[in-house]
Amino acid sequence: MNDRAVFFDLDGTLTDPKPGITRCIQHAMVGLGRTPPEADDLHWCIGPPLRGSFARLLDTSDGALLDRALALYRDRFGTIGLFENSLYPDAPGAVRALRALGYRTFVVTAKPEIFAVRIIEHFSLAGLFERVHGSELDGRRTDKGDLIAHVLAQERLEPSRVVMVGDREHDAIGAARCAVRCVGVSYGYGTEAELRAQGVTALARSPRDILSLVEALFEKDVRAP
């Protein structure tokens, strides 16, 4: 089997989850008696681990309060929010093109795996990925570096033969920690400046760019002395 692999983030890379995530955050805030921000003021919450986002939104480090916020969020997300989501139209084609060239493809997301699997199945994408890897509900592997390291070990992949594709700085930071190259996508919820600041190897402005950028990285390896 080909040993080259591409790890795809989910939110902001394969799908646009804004309605579901923002509405669930607002639901949790109201449930805690707080006034929630407008949806457009919550873009920064799309991608990073939610516990940290709630800590900032609630201005607290109280573990019990953060647990309650996450529980309220998941009550709505697990039944309604995960389907308030849309597929980036060209994303499946990008994954298919990579697979046609022999790349192994995986979803690698900080979202709890139980939810990520349901979203991938909802959009009929399961056949495009060998496996969906995500975090645990207890908070394990919400850090992208920890998650990427886990996937490399589980799938027995060499970091130099893997490219991470994601839209937030957490994807680039986590990939760098594991010596994995990262293609940033600027069509998601991270800014181009955010991604470049973390040293992404290349920048895709649409899903259509992903194939050529990944191919260019591996061609460079072949040409290297």
Image (spheres, helix red, strand yellow):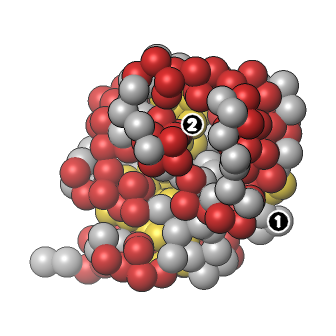
What amino acid does circle 2 point to? Answer: Lys
Residue at disc 2, secondary structure: strand
Q: Is residue 216 above or below residue 128?
A: below
State the image coordinates of residue 191 (x, y, percent, origin top left): 51, 76
Q: Image point 39% across, 55% down: which residue?
A: 170
Q: Image point 39% across, 26% down: which residue?
A: 62
Counting every numbered tag in the picture gives 2
State the image coordinates of residue 151 (x, y, percent, origin top left): 39, 34
Classed neighbour count for the residue bearing mark 2: other residues with Cα under 10 Å, few (<14), some (14–19), many (≥20)? many
Task: Please report contact status of discs 2 and 1: CB closer than 8 Å, yes or no.
Answer: no
Question: Can residue 101 be seen in the rendering of this structure?
Answer: no
Q: Is residue 199 above or below residue 24?
A: below
Q: Is residue 201 above or below residue 29?
A: below
State the image coordinates of residue 6 (x, y, percent, origin top left): 48, 53
Classed neighbour count for the residue bearing mark 1: other residues with Cα under 10 Å, few (<14), some (14–19), many (≥20)? few
Task: Specify the farthest residue to the left.
Answer: 225
Left or right: residue 90 versus residue 220 is right
Measured in 3D between alpha carbons, the distance from the residue under mark 2 to the one under mark 1, in whole angstroms, is 21 Å
Q: Toward the viewer: 165 or 83?
A: 83
Q: Toward the viewer: 70 or 186?
A: 70
Read off the residue under disc 1. Answer: 89
What amino acid does circle 1 point to? Answer: Pro
Read off the residue under disc 2. Answer: 111
State the image coordinates of residue 18 (x, y, percent, origin top left): 74, 56
Of callouts 2 and 1, the N-terminal one: 1
